Amino acid sequence: MLNILWPVFIVISFLYALFSGNVDKLNESIFQSVSDAVQLSITLLGTICLWNGIMEIVKKTTLINKLTKMLNPIIKYLFPDLRNNEQAKAEISMNIVANILGLGNAATPLGLKAMKTMQKENLKKDVLTDSMAIFIVMNTASLQLIPTNVIAIRSSLDSQNPTTIIFPVWIATVIAAIVGIIAIKIIIRRVKQ
């Protein structure tokens, strides 16, 4: 659908600029947008590189074991099917930590690894397990303490105070996570009955 909408919007914009005599403004806005996009990409790239590097260091130290132990009670409750799958628990822990730090881009590869690990034990390969469904909901809610990408975007757009978003992000992500987990647990119980 977006493959159709965006080209239509672009064509309408060009036609409107042409007929209203604003072709110069259109050209100016195109080049300004390209410049802003490059600046934003550089800002985000720096943030992503920093945190991905930190996550790689964490993976290669004993810190991952400590984080997994710290998150173990939560993971046991949310993922009861993964009692014996320590690799999946570690990957889920890393994904949760990356999301909490606001590193959605770093969390994605970790989430994909966790899904592949859980898929290995899945008896019905074309159907999600309960743990996989819960993990998708948690990942989508993306519980965050430090929304680094949003702060980086706000900084690159010259926000006067880019960190004012932190408290609303806490509220939104906590509510999304709680509602999502409760909903998926209810759905899982109803499906099993």
Image: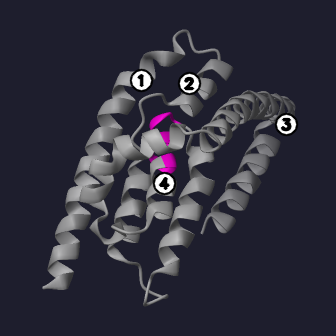
Residue 128 in the magenta stretch? The answer is no
Q: Quadrant of the N terminus?
A: bottom right
- Crowding at label 2, few (<14), some or many (≥20) Cα neighbours within 10 Å? many
**First in residue order: circle 2 vs circle 4:** 4
Which residue position is annotated with label 1?
166
Which residue position is annotated with label 3?
23
Write down the region rendered in magenta. 94-102
As drawn, 173 above or below 115 = above
Q: Is residue 170 left or right of residue 181?
A: right
- Crowding at label 3, few (<14), some or many (≥20) Cα neighbours within 10 Å? some
Whether tag 2 and tag 1 are in contact, CB under 8 A, the answer is yes
Which x, y percent locates residue 21?
Answer: 81, 35
Q: Is residue 132 left or right of residue 22?
A: left
**Residue type of the residue flagged with mark 1:** Ile
Front residue of this view, candidates 101 and 30? 101
As drawn, 125 above or below 146 = below
Which residue position is annotated with label 4?
90
Outermost residue, left direction?
Answer: 193
- For marks 3 and 4, give the CA distance: 55 Å
Which x, y percent locates residue 104?
Answer: 56, 44
- For marks 2 and 3, give the CA distance: 34 Å
- For marks 2 and 4, give the CA distance: 28 Å
- For marks 1 and 4, give the CA distance: 27 Å
Outermost residue, top direction?
Answer: 160
Q: How is the protein colored in the picture? A: one colour
Q: Secondary structure at mark 2?
A: helix
Q: Secondary structure at mark 1?
A: helix
As drawn, 98 above or below 111 = above
